[in-house]
Image (cartoon, helix red, strand yellow):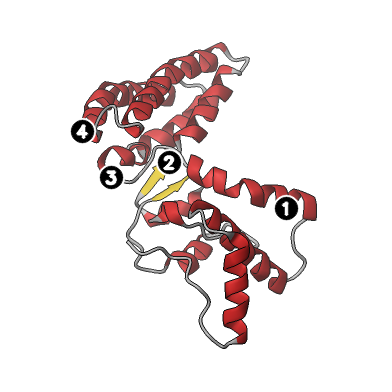
Amino acid sequence: MASTFTLFTMRGSRAATVLTELLGETFSGVVMCDRAKMYWQLGRLQWCWAHLKRDFQALIDSSDHQVKRLGHDLMRPTKRLFREWARCRDGTITRRTLKRRLTPVRREIEHLLLRGLFSGNPKLIGMCRELYDHRQWLWTFLDQDGVDPTNNLSERSLRHAVIWRKLSFGTQSAAGSRFVETTLTVIETCRQQSRDLFTYLTDAVDAHFRSQPSPSLITKP
């Protein structure tokens, strides 16, 4: 369902209370996210492997030989994870096969995180402890249908919004923020649903002047 619409919201912070406001107290889905602590309260997460891959690349780029070596060792199974996921995504293998093939990858990565955790190197200990202590959030996609290992879909949806922000320098009022988040929601959702944006906006304006509900952006199952 989430692949058919995008909801934008503009807030002044990434506080955990913003998530509660948006998702409600009883949200039971899986949230794809980076490792920002604001998400931890939700419990059911999938940490984005694209972000993790960049983190491992940063280790590789370090001048510290021990850090660099662990980065290389983590990157090898990570690349295998992406190769196997690509096969699953295109239908070459099933989720069950993906889970079986990634079992040794999972074991290797968790072993490497332990190596970093007990390395005595302060450049490794913090990150490796966080990843190992919450390792279940690395593998949610293996057990939950519909969950990807990356948030690439969200990143693509954000692209136009990021460009707009750079060109416009953001908004100056709460009303402006509500207008922009609504407009971005409509633009991106129409794109995802292959709907004509101008037609939707025309219908929405017409409905407003007729005191009727706006056309829905939620597609029927």
User: Does label 4 or label 3 sit earlier along the sequence?
Assistant: 4
Q: Give whichever of 89, 96 is nearer the camera.
A: 89
The three-letter code of the residue at mark 3 reads Gln
Q: Distance between the residues labelled 1 and 4?
A: 42 Å
Q: Residue at the spot x=37%, y=33% of the render?
A: 132
Query: In front of the other: label 3 or label 2?
Result: 3
Which residue is identified by label 4?
96
Q: How far apart are marks 1 and 2 (CA)?
A: 26 Å
User: Does label 1 or label 4 sit earlier along the sequence?
Assistant: 4
The quarter in which the C terminus is drawn is bottom left
How busy is the neighbourhood of tag 3: few (under 14 within 10 Å), some, or many (20 plus)? few
Q: Distance between the residues labelled 2 and 4?
A: 20 Å
Q: In this view, does 50 lie above or below 83?
A: below
Which residue is identified by label 2?
47
Percent x, y of residue 192: 50, 52
Q: Residue at the spot x=28%, y=37% of the render?
A: 142
Disc number for residue 144: 3
Q: Give whichever of 72, 127 is nearer the camera.
A: 72
Q: How far apart are marks 3 and 1 (CA)?
A: 34 Å
For residue 11, side relative to residue 220 (left or right): right
Task: Count all numbered tags in the image, as a single digit.
Answer: 4
The three-letter code of the residue at mark 1 reads Arg
Secondary structure at numbered mark 4: helix
Q: Give whichever of 203, 65 is nearer the camera.
A: 203
The quarter in which the N terminus is drawn is bottom left
